[in-house]
Amino acid sequence: MIQAITEMMSHAFIQRAVLVGSLVSLCAALLGVSLVLKRYSMIGDGLSHVGFGILSIATAFGFSSPLYIAIPGVTIFAIILLKIGNNSKIKSDSAIALISSSALAIGVAVTSITTGLNTDVCNFMFGSILAMSISDVYLSIIVSIIVAILFIIYYRKLFIITFDEDFAKASGLKAKRYTNLIAILTALIIVVGMRMMGTMLISSIIIFPALTSMRLFKSFKKVIISSGIISVVSFLVGIYMSYIYNISTGATIVIVNLVLFVIFTILDKIIHE
Amino acid sequence: MKDIIQLKDVCFSYPTKKDTLKHININVKQGTFTCIVGENGSGKSTLLKCILGLNKGYTGEIKKEKIIGYLPQKNEIQTNFPASIEEVILSGTISNNMRSIFYKKEDKENAEAIMRELEVYDIRKKCFADLSGGQQQRVLIARALCATKKIIILDEPTNGLDPSIAKQIYELLDKLKKEMKITVLMVSHDIERALNYADEVIEIINGEVKFIGKPSEFKKGGAK
């Protein structure tokens, strides 16, 4: 096994993938805890579809690095989706479903007219961490580091906003500012994460580690730390298995996450009986 | 005694419900235990939310403290939330230092003192969601005290509690008022018990103030 790992890591493109993937997985898991607890999980899913729409359109118009267009685009939608959740006549889950399926449909339609459903589009759907361009790699690393730093700086406020928004407001905290921050950070991670996991699978690395950790841990800090570890471990195991058995990387990562979730659920049952 | 909260001619309408609050004029004196009573849908909670700044778009004038220790009604998110009691209580100190990344030493000491005072220090590592309803309220009162020692506002804190536990919560609030000079403002529809502890009663019916005064006067005239 050690030999296989050394061989795998001798490729420069895999080294890059491991670095980017670990960072993105870590950030997705950190944000995931707040998103799951605030019942915002579906927003992650919705945003990834919006991301697909924007990436497809940008590709169709011939942008060589569509991520630079997708990041601001998805960020705007993230804020819109949160606003809809707060006050609207359409229930937020149906609103998200409407927006996400529309974005997906527009993306597919645009690509069918222009380039056709080529590998680029397929990569956006199911991810292709090993095929990332150098510029995408750098962008993803920078974005992940920014997200991680902001998360640490605002950790205390994110906790209080997640746990009890009304109390936070009564204490003089600008709650709206921090829910928008959560939305923006999520948008950033979703766009860079889509390169590795794909539209269809990105929301799993946001949701799974948080849910898995919550089976066993009962304090916010422990859940955050455990989610980060679970997410990075799942990614590393996933990319190794996908290399050895030649399975799609994104799919393997989700399956490893699923296995860990089942193991933690069983452990929870054993411990609490 | 100084007024800690003043409302002058406050009106509020929801988009779907007009005139939820009609020309409310009330003053809450510092160091008192004030109880707002009224039936469900009378506008009590709406009034609290206006005072707290959670409801925007009211007309009239509200003077209040910048930081208020608030105990909201039980929210659904908290039922399965992984948070230790210590984390919940410590988070109340956030208003004292918004800027720094970590909790300061004095905040931790302050929180520890409050935890000991409210007898939740020994269970501080436990999960908030696993506590009984009464214990959860104690923890949330502790958190409110971390935010401020001037005024706490409570929205139906004894809802769903056993009568004996509810009595303990009232006694705790009474003690905070007497020993720490904290102003207590609460909304309740448990009128009878509230009257035993309150210094002042405000009755709201259909968005209007129907009675303000001492509990003894309320018992004579206002009670139905």
Image (cartoon, coloured by chain):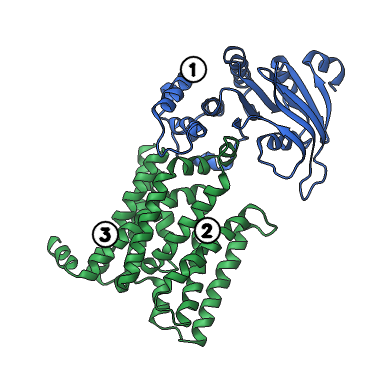
Q: Which of pointers 3 and 2 lies earlier in the amino acid sequence?
A: 2
Residue drawn where x is 76% and y is 21% of the image:
B201
Say whether residue A15 is left or right of residue A163: left
3 and 1 marks on the same chain: no
Say whether residue A267 is left or right of residue B94: left
Indicate the chain coloured green by its letter.
A
Tell me the SS state at disc 3. helix
Residue drawn where x is 81% and y is 22% of the image:
B212
Q: Looking at the rendering, which quadrant does residue B83 occupy?
A: top left
In the rendered view, tell whether residue B23 sits above or below residue A136.
Answer: above
Query: Local crowd at mark 1 within 10 Å, few (<14), some, or many (≥20)?
Result: few
Number of the label disc, if any, that sits on residue B117: 1
Say whether residue A261 is left or right of residue A8: right
Name the foreground residue: A245 vs B45: B45
Q: Which chain is home to disc 1?
A: B
Q: Quadrant of the N terminus of chain B?
A: top right
Name the foreground residue: B119 vs B144: B144
Amino acid type indicated by mark 2: Met
For label 3, the residue is: A237
For label 2, the residue is: A42
3 and 2 marks on the same chain: yes
Q: Which chain is home to disc 2?
A: A
Query: Local crowd at mark 2 within 10 Å, few (<14), some, or many (≥20)?
Result: some
Residue B143 in view: yes
Look at chain B in the picture and name its colour: blue
